[in-house]
Amino acid sequence: RYMSLRHRYTNEMSRSATTDTSAGYSPSAILGVAAKGQTYKNLLYLFLAFPLGMLYFIFLTTGFALGVGLSMVVIGLGILLVMLVGVRALGAFERKLANRLLGTEIRPPDDIEPEENGLVAIGKAYVSASSTWRQFGFLFLKFFTGILSFVLLTLFVGIAVDLVLAPVFPEGALGVQINDWTVAESVETTAEQALAVLAGVVIGLVGLHLLNAFARVNASIASSLLGAEGSGTAPPAE
């Protein structure tokens, strides 16, 4: 009887795994990515990553370089304190952005407990809090994830849009150009336009799946660095 139950359990698990795998590669799962609202929230988050990452990089490098350079005088310490406050404010903004667009549930960090009142006590609390430096790491990392987001959006979304709209905009709806290759200029005849539309749809669908996966990576990074320890959860797979 034990062997019979074990055999039945094994068969059920095997059927369940097969069903899950086939569902993951079903036409509805492949094509449905374009109809999911979370996909476009992910795209918006990745679109904003590049300009925000640039701003954070300039803010961090300029502010901390200036503060450290003037740290021997009072104004330098004041600049460093302002920078720490700014890091936490930007971290709070990024936390809300991730919760709104990526579907995370990141709680604010709770490790700021000044022992006394005053700027000095607050400054010490900010410096000693691990969440300050985790948020600093996230803002600095945003520069690189923003560049990668821009590259992926250009490669997949930009090229897909230019190919799909090639019959309507022969010169390119977005005018995507990679090195010396202009996407729209490679499509001339009617047959090439028809193939371009098909290729654009395929590239677009593949790109949406890859961009959703990259958005989930960003959600995991945000969950690890922006909130209280163990507070964040990555969004469900889309």
Image (cartoon, grey):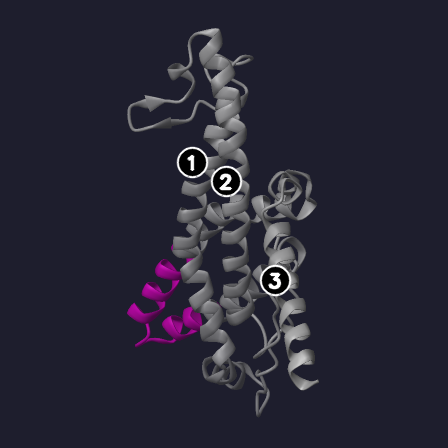
Q: Which mark is residue 155?
A: 1
Picture coordinates of residue 121, whole percent (x, y): 52, 86
Dominant secondary-structure state across the stretch colored magenta: helix
In this view of the protein, which residue sits in the foreground, 2 or 223? 2
| Region in magenta | 58-82
Q: Amino acid at mark 1?
A: Leu
Q: Secondary structure at mark 1?
A: helix
Indicate yes or no whether the magenta region holds residue 212.
no
Q: Residue at x 51, y 76 (%)?
A: 131
Residue 28 image offset from top left, x and y in percent: 66, 41
Q: CB atoms at circles 3 and 1 under 8 Å apart?
A: no
Q: CA distance from mark 2 to mark 1?
A: 8 Å
Q: Which residue is mark 2?
A: 207
Is residue 165 in sight in this rendering?
yes
Amino acid type, mark 3: Ala
What SS does tag 3 mark?
Answer: helix
| 11 sits left or right of 181 in the view | right
The first of marks 2 and 1 along the sequence is 1
Crowd tier of the residue under label 1, counting other residues whose Cα lies within 10 Å: few below 14, some 14–19, many 20 or above:
some
